[in-house]
Amino acid sequence: MKKLIITLIVFALFANCTTQQNKNEAEAEKTLYIEWFGENEMANNMVMSGMNHFNNIEFEKSFVFFEKSIALDSTLFASHAMLTAFSLPNSEEQEFHYNKAKELVSDKNVNSKLFVSLLDTKNKNGKRHILGLDNNKYDKWVSMHKNEPKGQFIKFWYSRGIDDIKEREKALLDLLEEFKTKNIDYGPILNMLGYHYAQNGDPEKAKEFFENYIKVRPNGYNAYDSMGEYYFNLKDYKKSKEYYMMALSKYPPANSAQNKIREIDAMK
């Protein structure tokens, strides 16, 4: 009996040490990623799809997934934040989602709070938006990236806002290689690099990246929209319309493609 008691005591001490070690390891591995997810697995899948479409500038589809995610789990502050950004300026929906995001993020980590704080100020039209490269907003992306440089969503939107052209190019190219190596969707980076080169005097390189974007995302609609804009800026309106029509064939409600086709048709 005495041996049994001693054995149980030793086992209890070992278990306690193991538990404490696991706890310490878990604490050491804590990250400051934006806390996108909740307990509902289906809602979390909706969030992931929403993020994917958002990064690919497929906002119409992104909206649907974020809206569905809060229908399944209304406690997802980040989905409320994204729906704030999609809402009409000064609308009741905008303020509802903004207030819910602020309420629900109160007990989350610092980067989650910084993410929601991007919505704190309205632009001159009364819109609260996530994106935008004004100093106040970009400083928050810089802070988030400093807090958690491994965060994919943070790293992507931080890189695109780097002011120095050469530094931005290097950051995006490095991120492209990292995402390729880790088998992460790198379509958004190809798109961003296409625009980077188009806006900085290298149309041939821009075309190369837009073409690669279509190859890696053939079923998305923004890849064709981007190529449509590329030809539109070169004043090749016939080719431009062809690509905008391809975008609509992938997703008929795509607003950008619809508007550009109307603009091209009005030139005739």
Image: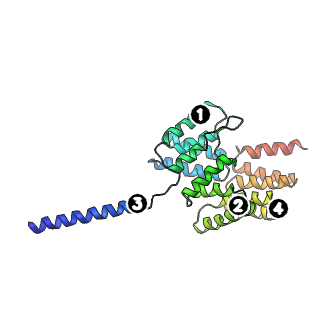
Amino acid type for the residue under numbered disc 4: Pro
Residue at 9 percent across and 67 percent down: it is 2
Q: In which quarter of the image is the C terminus?
A: top right
Residue at 70 percent across and 43 percent down: it is 253
- How crowded pointer 3 is (Cα within 10 Å; few <14, some 14-19, many 20+) is rated as few
Residues at circles 2 and 3 in contact by the CB criterion of under 8 Å: no
Q: Which of 169 and 182 is in front in this view?
A: 169
Residue, disc 2: 168
- Which of the two discs, 2 and 3, labels the residue nearer the N terminus? 3
Which mark is drawn over residue 26?
3
Question: How far apart are the alpha carbons under marks 2 and 3?
Answer: 34 Å
Residues at circles 3 and 4 in contact by the CB criterion of under 8 Å: no
Q: Where is residue 246 in the image (x, y as percent from the top left)?
A: 75, 52
Q: In which quarter of the image is the N terminus?
A: bottom left
Q: Is mark 1 on a helix, strand or loop?
A: helix
Q: Splitting the image into 4 quarters, where does residue 83 fall?
A: top right
Residue, disc 1: 95
Question: How far apart are the alpha carbons under marks 2 and 1?
Answer: 34 Å
- Which of the two discs, 3 and 4, labels the residue nearer the N terminus? 3
Residue, disc 4: 203
In this rendering, the label closer to the viewer, 2 or 1 = 2
